[in-house]
Image: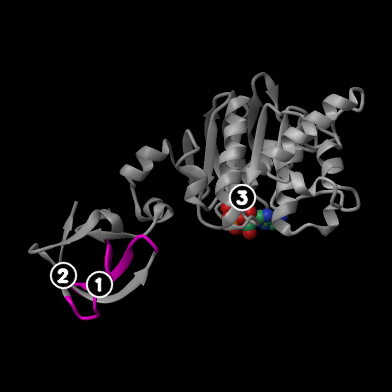
Amino acid sequence: MLQVKNISFSYKKQAVLNNISFNVKAGEHVSIIGESGSGKSTLLKLLYGTYDLHKGHIFWNNSEILGPKHNLIIGPEFMKYVAQEFDLMPFITVAENIGAFLSNFYPEEKQARINELLDVVELKPFAKTKVKELSGGQKQRVALARAIAKQPEIILLDEPFSHIDNFKKQSLRRSLFKYLKEKNITCIVATHDKDDVLSYSDNMIVLHDAKIMANTTPQELYNNPENKLIASFFGEFNEINSKIIYANQLKPVDRSDLKAIVKQSYYKGSFYLIEADLNGENVFFEHDVQLKKGKTVFLYQV
Ligand SMILES: Nc1ncnc2c1ncn2[C@@H]1O[C@H](COP(=O)(O)OP(=O)(O)OP(=O)(O)O)[C@@H](O)[C@H]1O
């Protein structure tokens, strides 16, 4: 189990994290979300022992994770961290990068393991390509494969799919998170993307104002968003009579107390997002067809 106990940290005067505590059980997947600058990357770096804590303690089972004052080499053996800037060896191949830290003692096993990892990150066709010739997204996939190569007990991922295109992202996400769950690898992901969270995380931690604003399941946070910051992570929403209502929960009906005038329709593939004026405020709802500007609609929360 990972135990984070009352940790505080700042780069300068202002606290980035102030007295934060949480636990993650072995094999659990946790997402860290929050606005840009809320301290997600800093938290991952502290979990990895990159900096010395100003206050508090971090434990993985019985080992305390300590910063550079106490360790010559940053990062414990049982933990891997994939940063936003991945640090690969450009002049050797993808397969060599992935296998760089694997033992050469059993060459056949090593090759089989490299092949398995190439499958997880869908890079088989690039096995023999030099890393310097890869795109940003391909490099990110090599970094992910290298991080899981020696099967860590816990992995920290900072925006793991940020460089990966939409064609690949969905299948890579499924493949990587499935692999980590199967191997019971604890996973902590800092992300801006709800698709990294909803289907894969056991818990979500929301960072705000140097504190943990929420720490619960994605279902609980989605169904009962306590505030606008949390709702905005999941998509377009409205605040009507002090209640948060997602755009997909609002439908036009024949008559209701919520009379709005259509301003704009945005094509979203399987639906249109309609922007309308409700008593001088913008309101958003989803609809299956485009609506004309100026049309009167009556809205109802489903
Ligand atoms: N090396 C550093 N030196 C000084 N300040 C830093 C350093 N790294 C981050 N900060 C500051 O600490 C705060 C938290 O940054 P951090 O990168 O942890 O946020 P984040 O939530 O990961 O942001 P993003 O979502 O944009 O990646 C920010 O105000 C940032 O400017």
Q: Label 2 belongs to which residue?
A: 297
Q: Quadrant of residue 258?
A: bottom left
Mark 1 nearby-residue class (10 Å; few <14, some 14–19, many ≥20) = many
**Quarter that holds the N terminus:** top right
Q: Secondary structure at mark 2?
A: strand
Circles 2 and 1 in contact, beta carbons < 8 Å? yes
Q: Secondary structure at mark 3?
A: loop
Q: Is mark 2 within 8 Å of ligand 1?
A: no
Q: Quadrant of residue 174?
A: top right
Q: Amino acid at mark 2?
A: Val
The quarter of the rendering in which ligand 1 is drawn is bottom right
Q: Secondary structure at mark 1?
A: strand
Tell me, yes or no, if residue 14 can be seen here.
no
Specify how the rendered protein is coloured: one colour
Nearer the observer, 104 or 245: 104
Residue 159 marker = 3
Residue 276 marker = 1
Q: Quadrant of residue 19?
A: top right
Circles 3 and 1 in contact, beta carbons < 8 Å? no
Q: Is mark 3 within 8 Å of ligand 1?
A: yes
